[in-house]
Amino acid sequence: MSNVPTSMNLSSKTNTPNMLPAKVKMRMTAIFIAVLGFYLFSSYKTDASFLELISGLGNMPLLLEEFFPPNLSLFSKIWPSLAETIQMAIIATTIAAMLCVPLSLLAANNIVTNKYLYNTVRFLLNLLRTIPDMVLAIVFVSLFGLGVLPGILALIVFSLGILAKLISETIESIDTNPLDAMRASGANSVQMISFSVVPQVLPQFSSFVLYVFEINIRASVVLGLVGAGGIGQVLNNQLSIRAYPNAMGIIIIIFILVIIIEFISNKIREAII
């Protein structure tokens, strides 16, 4: 007799049971209702709603009339400030990349066995990431005055928190067999890090540094709004005197610059990893 199933058998097999048990459905529904309730409560307490958003969008045509047409002829005049922004990002990213190496190693639990030291460094990294870059810029501007230096210092602290966190987690996920073998053979800490950890995390380290560099380009524009140098300071000046076509021209030039840098960075990352 043939073992080919009949159409009835096929039909019965295609009627698969419900993938989610009733208990899971109830739990997901309860979570959805809780999130929706939290959203509605937050909207009520902050007086923010979709109705307010829709009513505000009516002002968009009037705003666009003031910003357009953009003045793109400013490129030659703003180029020094634009170059200054790129230089700020390069300096801050380079210094943060160097400083994050020891912090990343100390924040990896497969490298540091002392829990007090590990938890202390982790706490420091969490603290660095907690402070917004804008607040850092305001603090450094208060300390050192207007200019590029406060912006660079703010970007260094901001980048250090991100890089050390990402790289320490990468170190914790490496293959520990080579590390254990070197430790058993009597290798010291420098040898274990040089010949076991570095080769495994170097591609990710390079990728993270390029990624943070892209972030710093955008962040340095914002920091200029509080007097921390770069093209953001020029943009703030144009907005303060209501020269909106000039401001839109600067925004478009910054957008093109960010796209170009992101494209180059992606190509480098693809070549590395």
Image (tube, grey):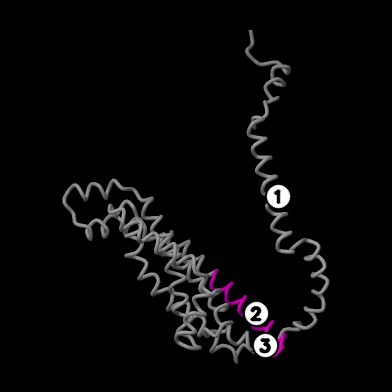
Q: Which of the two discs, 3 and 2, labels the residue nearer the N terminus?
A: 3
Q: Which residue is mark 1?
A: 36
Front one among 216 and 144: 144
Front one among 201 and 66: 66
**Image position, residue 267 (x, y; %):** 50, 66
Whether the residues at callouts 3 and 1 have beta carbons within 8 Å, the answer is: no
Rendered residue at 74%/64% (across/down) = 47
Q: Which numbered circle lies on residue 251?
A: 2
Q: Quadrant of the C terminus?
A: bottom left
Q: Which numbered circle lies on residue 240?
A: 3
Gap between marks 3 and 1 measured at Cα: 39 Å
Query: In the image as oriented, which residue stretches furthest toward the top?
Result: 1
**Image position, residue 237 (x, y; %):** 63, 89
What are the residue bounds of the magenta stretch?
Answer: 240-262
Front one among 107 and 138: 138
Q: Which numbered circle lies on residue 152?
A: none
